[in-house]
């Protein structure tokens, strides 16, 4: 057995547990797609922040 396989075993196990207990955790690249409206909204927000930065 490769030494790396042994070292990574706990990571694989925790990923398997997460997938079994919460299938929504699985990485889905489709869920990261951004709509055109979101892009425009972000650009507007970014422009507003540059012109009038908020101080927290």
Image (tube, helix red, strand yellow):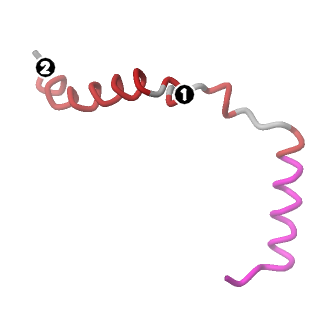
Provide residue 32's location: percent of width, then percent of height: 67, 34
Residue for point 39% across, 29% down: 18
Disc 2 + disc 1, Cβ < 8 Å: no
Query: 21 or 44, which lies in front?
Result: 21
Q: Is residue 10 left or right of residue 54?
A: left
Gap between marks 2 and 1 measured at Cα: 31 Å
Q: Mark 2 = which residue?
A: 2
Residue tagged 1: 24
Q: Residue furthest front?
A: 21
Q: Position of residue 50 (x, y in %)?
A: 81, 73
As drawn, 44 above or below 7: below
Seen at 16% across and 31% down, the residue is 7
User: What is the chief secondary structure element of the magenta stretch?
Assistant: helix
- Across and down, in percent, residue 22 comes to 47, 28
**Mark 2, residues whose alpha carbon is within 10 Å: few (<14), some, or many (≥20)?**
few
Q: Quadrant of the C terminus?
A: bottom right
Q: Nearer the viewer, residue 17 or 49?
A: 17
Q: Earlier in the sequence, mark 2 or mark 1?
A: 2
Residue 4, x across and y down, in percent: 17, 27
- Residue 54's place in the image compared with 30, above or below, is below
* Secondary structure of the residue carrying numbered label 2: loop
The label on residue 52 is: none
At a point 84% along the width and 79% down the height, the residue shown is 52
Residue beneath the point at 77% across and 37% down: 34
Of the pair 42 and 2, the residue shown nearer to us: 42
Instruction: Kindly state the secondary structure of the residue where label 1 is placed.
Output: helix
Magenta span of residues = 39-56
Quarter of the picture holding the N terminus:
top left
Left or right: 8 as drawn, with respect to 1? right
Q: Are there few (<14), some (14-19), or many (20+) residues within 10 Å of tag 1?
A: few
């Amino acid at each position: 057995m490769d030494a790396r396989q042994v070292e990574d075993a706990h990571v694989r196990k925790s990923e398997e547990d997460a997938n079994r207990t919460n299938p929504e955790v699985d990485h889905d690249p489709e869920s990261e797609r951004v709509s055109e409206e979101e892009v425009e909204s972000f650009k507007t927000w970014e422009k507003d922040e540059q012109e009038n930065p908020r101080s927290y």
